[in-house]
Amino acid sequence: MKRRQVLAAGAACCASLLARSAGAQAMHYAAPERFGRPDIASDEGGLWALMDREEKGLRRSPLVLRDEKLKNYVQDIACRLGSEHCPDIRVYLVRTPLFNASMAPNGMMQVWTGLLLRMENEAQLAAVLGHEIGHYLQRHSVERLRDIRSKSAFGQVLSLFGLIGAVGQIAVAASAYAYGREHEHEADRIGAVLMHRAGYDVAEAAKVWNNLLKEVRAREGKEPEQTAPLFASHPAPPERRDILGQIAAAMPGGSRGDDAYRRHVAAHLDEWLQDEVKRGQYAESLALISRQIGSGFAPGLMSYYRGEVYRLRAEPGDQDLALADYRLAAQMPDPPAVAFRGIGLICRQQGQNGEAVQGFRRYLELAPAAPDAAFIQSYLAELGS
């Protein structure tokens, strides 16, 4: 047997043993009692004070969603997971088209809309929230803080919790505040048992990681560690997926909550998909949107935005792919009006004037007050309609 095969077999064996051990340990996890506010003179007390200041700024931020119904929904999931720690958990939904959630030592939790867009059901969201609550319960952030000595590094740590990370410094924050493999595995294990106790299907936790892995791999065919700081600072994705799968096998049953989740986020999907397309990471967006279409999540709207990704990417053949998706979206029971505009624009370019006119007319029927209505009217006049 070749050396590489021997090493692979050894790694697989170790991962299997670790997974079985993790499943057994998780079943016996006992959460600590609620945390009292630490002395301001201590390192943890100082961190709490800084996080309090960050939280005040976050409350005023225009990036925070003001949808109380959605916020309360996510807060309720966090409370079901956190149990007696519920009064200390404060959830903020932040409009940022990246996959991220974090929880500060003082109980401030951020959940970014890029993460919400990537969830398929309530159980998957519970897996992410449970993982962050696991870090919180074990005080991992405090341990990490004690390892940091320089002032500059400390500022980078704060950027993970603050909005600095949302505007371009996520790579710096991830490297400065990367939990070790032991902490990540422990948070996964705790998150799984919190899910199980709250009545969720633990098998959905592995799907979250696997879905994200496929999405990142779509970018130029590179391994995730080469393109995503989240993966560079976490355990190897296949190992993590396998361990979560083994843990789930030890905790069968539970609900997924597909309908409840989709019902609560439906009003924001259009906005989140717009943000996703604007990122310009077309391969990742295609992987994400195609997966959601396959899961039956808002197929009309998702098909339209996949068409938009193809149109904007503009590689050979993409115009036809975009038109096919616009047509698919237009055939749905409650089609998005913009799908007909898309049909009109591409058919006009391709000289299919009859279908272009039909598309533009239908668009104006469904959205008579659209901001681009005058431009569409000019196209109709140009086409002799």
Image (spheres, rainbow, N blue to C red):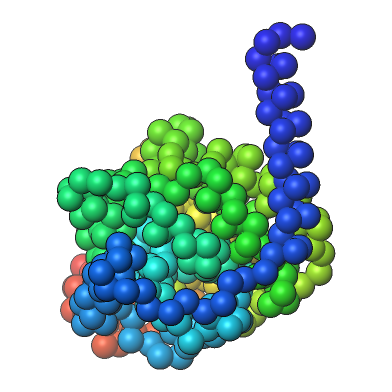
Q: List the single residue furthest toward the bottom.
A: 69
Asked whether 160 or 305 is in front, the reply is 160
Which quadrant is home to the N terminus?
top right
* The quarter of the displayed image where residue 8 is located: top right
Q: Residue 227's spot in the image, x, y percent?
A: 39, 38
| Residue shown at 36% from the left, 74% from the top | 38
Report whether 128 appears left or right of 17.
Answer: left
In percent of width and height, residue 339 lies at 42, 69
Residue 158, located in which quarter of the rendered image? bottom left
Taking the image as drawn, is residue 197 in sight?
yes
Q: Is residue 158 above or below residue 339?
A: above
Q: Residue at x 47, y 76 (%)?
A: 35
As drawn, is 145 to the left or to the right of 233?
Answer: left
At a point 55% along the width and 46% down the height, the residue shown is 182
Relative side of 344 to 245, left or right: left
Look at the image and tell me in which quarter the C terminus lies.
bottom left
